[in-house]
Amino acid sequence: MAKLSHLDERGQAHMVDVSGKDVTSRSATARGRVTAEAATLALITNGSAKKGDVLATARIAGIMAAKKTSDLIPLCHPLMINKVSVEFTLAERHIDVEATVKVEGKTGVEMEALTACSVACLTIYDMLKAVDRAMTITDIRLAEKTGGKSGPYKAE
């Protein structure tokens, strides 16, 4: 098993020293899903959710979350993010959420993409919870990443 980079030789948590790493182009995409009743999702498509534009609000929340990841995850490095995109695909009983984050840096943006996706999903829930408390948030995962020493990753 690989050594965990956030633990020192005594097993204590620490921030990884990235000072010796090269700056490279890096990106990460995370995906998640919000399931809901068809009538709940219809509120999005017909624009009648009481709290306003659900997807616009979730997109902004996801972008803001990516930028605040190092404030939320204790050992994450603050990054100068170049791009965050949050996209939605609606189906009859679910919304797929995809967040992509790009940076030129010394460390990856997987946590930023996962945070953006998670917060976008949570925002959808918050915007619609008054009509459907049984919604579920599922399948949040890293879909792919590029850049860095470990190279590309793509989920199957």
Image (cartoon, helix red, strand yellow):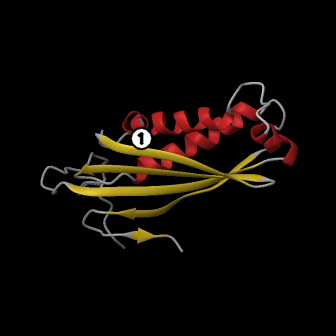
For disc 1, the marked residue is: 73
Q: Position of residue 33 (x, y in %)?
A: 66, 53
In the figure, 57 relative to 27: above or below?
A: above
Q: Is residue 62 something that shows in the picture? A: yes
Q: Which residue lies furthest to the top in this view?
A: 51
In the figure, 23 relative to 83: above or below?
A: below
Amino acid carrying label 1: it is Ile
Q: Where is residue 114 in the image (x, y as percent from the top left)?
A: 49, 50
Q: Nearer the viewer, residue 128 or 150?
A: 128
Decide if residue 66 is on the left or right side of residue 55: left
Decide if residue 62 is on the left or right side of residue 16: right
| Secondary element at image label 1 | loop
Q: Residue furthest right?
A: 39
Q: Position of residue 63 (x, y in %)?
A: 47, 38
Q: Is residue 134 something that shows in the picture? A: no
Q: Where is residue 42 in the image (x, y as percent from the top left)?
A: 82, 42
Tell me what residue is drawn at x 41 percent, y 49 percent: 101
Tell me what residue is drawn at x 31 percent, y 57 percent: 26
Q: Which of 128 and 48 is in front in this view?
A: 48
Decide if residue 44 is on the left or right side of residue 39: left
Q: In which quarter of the image is the C terminus?
A: bottom right
User: Residue 66 is drawn in which quadrant?
Assistant: top left
In the figure, 15 relative to 144: above or below?
A: above
User: Residue 131 is drawn in which quadrant?
Assistant: top right
Q: Which of 21 and 60 is in front in this view?
A: 60
Q: Residue furthest left?
A: 20
User: Residue 122 is drawn in which quadrant?
Assistant: top right
Tell me what residue is drawn at x 81 percent, y 29 percent: 130
